[in-house]
Image (spheres, coloured by chain):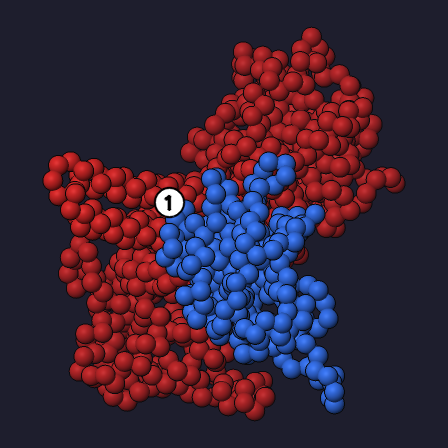
């Protein structure tokens, strides 16, 4: 059972049977939009990057992105940079794994972002999505579609934050512009 | 409290009366050989088997079965018995499997009378063997221990018994098989007659009164061996297969394996005079299988409860061999410790910065300047900090406990190349047949977890030279003479380890001691004769040795480039070379320094390695010219020093060299063994 989120919608990451989630995966998948006309079979390479920023009371503490694949504490892991996106499959092209049990006690929010490293806007991307998967059983918890067409190069996707003893996910979906997560910080901060 | 043993590992036994439970998927017959303190088995009457199922203190079943219970009373064994080796064998005959490789791995467990499991061992990795030594109970300075063996014999029971020096092994083995085939069926159903009232109770290991009758004096029972002194065993008949199946995986209650031995000379072997073991080859036990390589023993499955961390098991990592798995496991522990400490430090940093901010705020609030409001705000800020730090510390402590438990299992299971010098594995040291994968340079730890140290393992062959810094700053202010001595001692221990973990003739030691200042420390190497030549002294000696090694590097390089390594001149030693240099740069002229730098740069690729003992200040006259040399070497210190950074987070780790415990003879014993193998090799 997967929930399609709209902007600003929040879901709690409690399991239906009452147990809490222990490990989640934020998956990012995309395909480059086909060009029409002559040489239409040639697709231009688009490099989207998924990043996760770890916050403690609105202060960035650590970041996981393609140049720092594992957070220092080991709780958040990036599966590696994908430079071209999927070739027609709907699977995750980049993924960030979060072991919620191992997230340090002072970290209270983790924000997931996606940005276009090669500079194309999302108009040129097809089937881009971000989804949250319960890593223990592979079940999709939530899916957020990057409803294609915006004239921007980055998006603040979602955040997971502590709520009581467990974690809650909130879809943000706010557009931004930037090449890496550093450029997105001003856009992220209002969402904390 | 179960200790899951790996092959070769031992565990102390706190009780004398034990039940050894054996479960195999198919009927096996069980027996034991009794040995004296040298391990000698004095004839067939020292073997307890289905044909002669009872000896004082031990009795075995008369028939083959899938489940056995052997009861043992260590106190009732004759004084002369120092070893009890429990063996299993597949029955011969038309039906049934012909090798252990075709059946489920037999599982053995040692239980106390209350049914509490003390130790267990699964005999994995067997293949064509049809008989195997499973466990060894042995007496060491009056205390009994159990050791996991798993030494198998493809040629079966005759070979197993012959290996214990029994002259009529073939006849005896045939008798054993016949006895088990025609043995009275009572072993299957009812326990021995004299105690039949207790017979059924004896099945229950909780019933102590029935299982072992302590009032039977050992002396009288020894005179009348045929009458079993007590009910010793219950062979589970086939009518309860369910219980046999469900018992297979041991319960994984929180447990510790034998703690790593302390760093002193209390080890019983160390008390022996040097060379004692050398004169008693019979006392040394070879646990390696004659034909089996050490890899291929998969780690035991550890089913973890959902909410509890998995019980740590040695070798619980990926790899083709146990050696590689342990290497990966140690590096995994290293990374885990680095990361969990990073989480803790990050939380403490954050708590501190937040406290500072809160205090500033409290100070800048004009309302707080008078009265108690300000104090309360400051108090609240401090309480917030304490709460967060306590939370972080609790998480760290949880992780440290898990890593400590893992370390307690892993350390005793390490092979010599990875083991501390006080690890008992060195006492059973044998010259290996294959070169090792990695080497332990010492221990690493962090200030947050002083009691947990991680072995620093580096891959072999070494890519960089090693430099033992005899000018390292010390905390206790020991003088430079003392420090130089310690540095050289650490270097000698390292060189001895490198020599010992390579097959005979694969690794050669060369030493330069220009002023002869290290004669004492070089002693163990010189006395045992493992050095290729006495340490070179004086400028002439230095030049000669460096020239020889330079020529070797040059020739091997040429041969390799030409693709003709077999065309090397006969006088070129193709063994890996370790050049130890004491007190560099004393006795070195400019030419010699240049040669040494050549060896440092070009040597590692062609098997010439450098181990420098030097104080950088001594080479100050060279100015910055030697800086590239120092940078190219891996710096080790003879005293704890925090100069190692991990590759993940970059903490400063406190390094401690792997030193031989003071007063221990182990280095001498190991080197004697190496020298003997070397002499045989030549």
Q: Quadrant of residue B53?
A: top right
> Residue visible at 76% across and 28% down?
B242
Q: Colour of chain A?
A: blue
Along the viewing direction, whichever of B572 and A141 lies nearer the viewer: A141
Using residue B254 as the reference point, say whether residue B404 is left or right of it: left
The x and y percentages for residue B4 are 56, 39
Instruction: Say above or below: B186 vs B491.
Output: above
Using residue B627 as the reference point, say whether residue A42 is left or right of it: right
Tell me how many marks there are. 1
Q: Give the labeled residue for mark 1.
A: B392
Secondary structure category for the residue under label 1: helix
> Residue visible at 57% across and 51% down?
A9
| Mark 1 surroundings within 10 Å by alpha-carbon count, few (fewer than 14), some (14 through 19), many (20 or more) | many
Instruction: Say above or below: A37 vs B243.
Output: below
Q: Colour of chain B?
A: red
Using residue B72 as the reference point, say whether residue B578 is left or right of it: left
The x and y percentages for residue B569 are 51, 87
The x and y percentages for residue A103 are 46, 50
Note whether residue B573 is visible: no
Instruction: Say above or below: B352 vs B232.
Output: below
Residue that sits furthest to the left in the current view: B370
The x and y percentages for residue B274 are 37, 50
> Residue visible at 37% across and 80% down?
B600
Along the viewing direction, whichever of B370 and A41 lies nearer the viewer: B370
């Amino acid at each position: 059972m997967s929930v399609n989120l709209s902007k600003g919608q929040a879901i709690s990451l409690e399991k239906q049977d009452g147990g809490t989630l222990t490990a989640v995966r934020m998956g990012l998948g995309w395909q480059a939009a086909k060009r029409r006309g002559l040489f239409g079979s040639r697709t231009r390479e688009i490099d989207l990057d998924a990043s996760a920023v770890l916050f403690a009371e609105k202060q960035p503490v650590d970041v996981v992105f393609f140049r720092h694949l594992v957070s220092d504490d080991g709780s958040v892991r990036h599966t590696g940079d994908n430079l071209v996106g999927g070739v027609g499959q709907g699977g995750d092209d980049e993924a960030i794994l979060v072991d919620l049990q191992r997230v340090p006690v002072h970290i209270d929010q983790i924000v997931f972002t996606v940005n276009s490293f090669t500079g194309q806007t999302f108009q040129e991307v097809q089937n881009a999505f971000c989804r949250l998967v319960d890593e223990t059983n592979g079940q999709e918890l939530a899916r957020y579609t990057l409803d294609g067409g915006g004239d921007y190069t980055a998006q603040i996707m979602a955040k997971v934050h502590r709520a009581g003893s467990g974690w809650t996910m909130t879809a943000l979906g706010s557009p931004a512009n930037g090449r890496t997560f550093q450029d997105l910080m001003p856009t992220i901060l209002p969402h904390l | 409290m179960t200790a899951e043993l790996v092959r070769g590992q031992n565990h102390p036994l706190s009780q004398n009366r034990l039940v050894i439970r054996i479960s195999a998927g198919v009927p096996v017959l069980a027996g034991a050989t009794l040995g004296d303190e040298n391990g000698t088995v004095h004839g067939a009457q020292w073997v307890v088997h289905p044909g002669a199922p009872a000896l004082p203190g031990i009795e075995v079943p008369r028939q083959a079965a899938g489940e056995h219970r052997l009861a043992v009373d260590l106190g009732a064994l004759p004084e002369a018995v120092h070893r009890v080796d429990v063996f299993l064998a597949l029955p011969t005959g038309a039906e049934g499997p012909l090798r252990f490789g075709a059946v489920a791995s037999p599982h053995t467990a040692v239980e106390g009378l209350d049914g509490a499991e003390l130790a267990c061992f699964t005999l994995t990795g067997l293949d064509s063997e049809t008989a195997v030594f499973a466990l060894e109970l042995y007496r060491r300075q009056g205390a009994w221990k159990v050791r996991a063996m798993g030494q198998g014999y493809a040629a079966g029971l005759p070979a197993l018994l012959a290996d214990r020096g029994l002259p009529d092994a073939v006849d005896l083995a045939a008798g054993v098989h016949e006895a088990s085939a025609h043995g009275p069926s009572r072993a299957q159903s009812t326990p021995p007659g004299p105690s039949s009232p207790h017979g059924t109770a004896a099945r229950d290991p909780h019933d102590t009164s029935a299982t072992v009758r302590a009032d039977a004096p050992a002396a009288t029972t020894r005179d009348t061996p045929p009458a079993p002194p007590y009910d010793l065993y219950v062979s589970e008949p086939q009518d309860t297969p369910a219980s046999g199946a469900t018992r297979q995986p041991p319960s994984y209650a929180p447990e510790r394996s034998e703690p790593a031995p302390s760093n002193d000379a209390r080890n019983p072997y160390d008390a022996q005079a040097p060379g004692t073991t050398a004169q008693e080859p019979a006392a040394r036990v070879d646990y390696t299988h004659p034909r089996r390589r050490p890899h291929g023993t998969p780690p035991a499955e550890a089913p973890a409860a959902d909410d509890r961390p998995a019980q740590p098991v040695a070798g619980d990592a990926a790899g083709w061999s146990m050696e590689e798995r342990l290497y990966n496991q140690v590096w995994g522990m290293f990374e885990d410790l680095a990361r969990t400490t990073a989480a803790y430090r990050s939380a403490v940093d954050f708590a501190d910065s937040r406290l500072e901010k809160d205090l500033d705020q409290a100070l800048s609030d004009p309302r707080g300047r008078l009265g108690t409001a300000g104090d309360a705000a400051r108090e609240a800020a401090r309480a917030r900090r304490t709460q967060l730090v306590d939370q972080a510390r609790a998480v760290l402590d949880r992780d440290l406990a898990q890593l400590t438990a893992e370390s307690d299992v892993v350390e005793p299971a390490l092979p010599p190349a990875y083991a501390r010098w006080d690890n008992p594995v060195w006492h059973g040291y044998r010259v290996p047949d294959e070169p090792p994968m990695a080497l332990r340079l010492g221990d690493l730890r962090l200030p947050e977890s002083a009691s947990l140290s991680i072995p620093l393992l580096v891959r072999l062959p070494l890519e960089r030279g090693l430099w033992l810094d005899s000018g390292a700053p010390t905390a206790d202010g020991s003088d430079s003479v003392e420090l130089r001595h310690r540095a050289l001692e650490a270097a000698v221990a390292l060189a001895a380890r490198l020599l010992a973990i390579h097959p005979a003739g694969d690794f050669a030691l060369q030493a330069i001691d220009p002023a002869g200042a290290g004669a004492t420390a070089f002693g163990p190497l010189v006395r045992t004769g493992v050095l290729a030549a006495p340490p070179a002294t004086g400028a002439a000696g230095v030049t000669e040795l460096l020239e020889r090694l330079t020529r070797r590097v040059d020739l091997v390089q040429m041969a390799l480039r030409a693709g003709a390594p077999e065309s090397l001149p006969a006088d070129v030693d193709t063994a890996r070379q370790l050049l130890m240099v004491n007190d560099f740069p004393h006795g070195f002229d400019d030419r010699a320094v240049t040669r040494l730098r050549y060896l440092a740069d070009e040597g590692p690729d062609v098997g010439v390695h450098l181990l420098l003992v030097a104080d950088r200040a001594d080479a100050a006259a060279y100015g910055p010219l030697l800086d590239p040399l120092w940078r190219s070497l891996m710096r080790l210190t003879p005293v704890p020093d925090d100069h190692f950074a991990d590759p993940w987070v970059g903490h400063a780790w406190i390094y401690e060299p792997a030193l031989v415990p003071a007063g221990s003879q182990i280095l001498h014993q190991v080197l004697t063994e190496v020298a003997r193998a070397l002499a045989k090799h030549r």
